[in-house]
Image (spheres, helix red, strand yellow):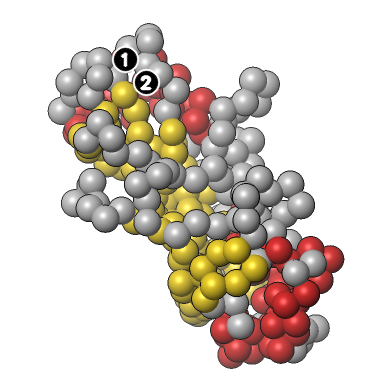
Amino acid sequence: MPRYALKIEYDGAPFAGWQWQDDQPSVQGAVEAALRRLEPEVPRIAAAGRTDAGVHALGQVAQCDIARDWEPFRLSEALNYHLKPLPVAITAAARVADDWHARFSATERRYLFRLLTRRAPATHEAGRVWQVKTPLDIDAMRAGAAHLLGHHDFTTFRSTICQAKSPVKTLDEIAITEAPGFNGPEIHFHLRARSFLHNQVRSIVGTLERVGAGSWAPEDVKTALQARDRAACGPVCPPHGLYLAGVGYPDDPFA
């Protein structure tokens, strides 16, 4: 069966996460339902990452095996037709080798977290940003974030239900930038690694927000990391500001 890579964008608000579930709506379930409108016996699809409930995606990548040899553009158009009116879109499709895998062939994942800083309630961006009403010290957050770069035991920033075999990960990038948002000033957190632990990004951003608010000193982030203790972590921020921004491969299938 020909194998295809799908680049997928979605609003995570209506879903219980990416992964298929028996009794709750999922993004995987929505895409598989659209595929089965094209071929009833399509096997289960696999994705580069399992986003949690409420988490969004700009560049999730999944694979599917289908019997018919589709022209990639036609496949994406057909799937988008059957995905309506759900907030899920196939932004690109590509034919890939039979041994290519959306998860295991990936060399990096990139996440974006959007934080809105204004007192008035968010309207248009509600459910798409984490709103904090007080100004934050970006330089202090950058100083705190510097302690997290590189190869570390991230037990402190790992969910207690994380199923990864090891808490040791390499964080390749964590950049914090100011952005003029539609509803007001935003702070964007850009994180890049080969793979992440469950709740790692939200735990890191929630901790750094405490640094920006002045409740933590930048050095406290290093102390928390070295504690290797979940109780040493700052608050875990809500999921609706988090986006799976992209997935990297040795050869970009969508290039």
**How many numbered discs, if any?**
2
Name which residue type carries label 2: Leu
In this image, 88 relative to 81: left or right? Answer: right
Q: Position of residue 217 (x, y in %)?
A: 74, 89
Residue 228 in view (yes/no): yes
Image quadrant containing the N terminus: top left
Taking depth in this image into account, of 197 and 234 the one nearest to the observer is 197
Please name the residue that numbered disc 1 is placed on.
38
Residue 35's label in the rendered image is: 2
- The residue furthest front is 165
Residue 114 falls in image quadrant = bottom right
State the CA–CA distance, disc 1 to disc 2.
5 Å
Residue 153 or residue 177, whichever sits in front: 153
Q: Which of these two is toward me, 80 or 94?
A: 94
Residue visible at 69% across and 82% down?
222
At a point 54% along the width and 37% down the height, the residue shown is 18
Question: Is residue 181 shown to the viewer in this render?
Answer: no
Q: Residue at x 46, y 72 (%)?
A: 172
- Which quadrant of the view contains residue 73? top left
Question: Seen in the image, is 156 located left or right of residue 57?
Answer: right
Q: Amino acid at mark 1?
A: Leu
Mark drawn on residue 149: none
Q: Is residue 147 above or below residue 85?
A: below
- SS class of the residue under badge 2? helix
> Residue reaching furthest right?
231
Residue 247 position within the rendered picture, expressed as x and y whole percent measured from the top left:
38, 53
| Residue 142, percent from left and from top | 57, 85
Residue 251 x/y as whole percent: 22, 53
Q: Is 129 placed above or below 91 here?
A: below
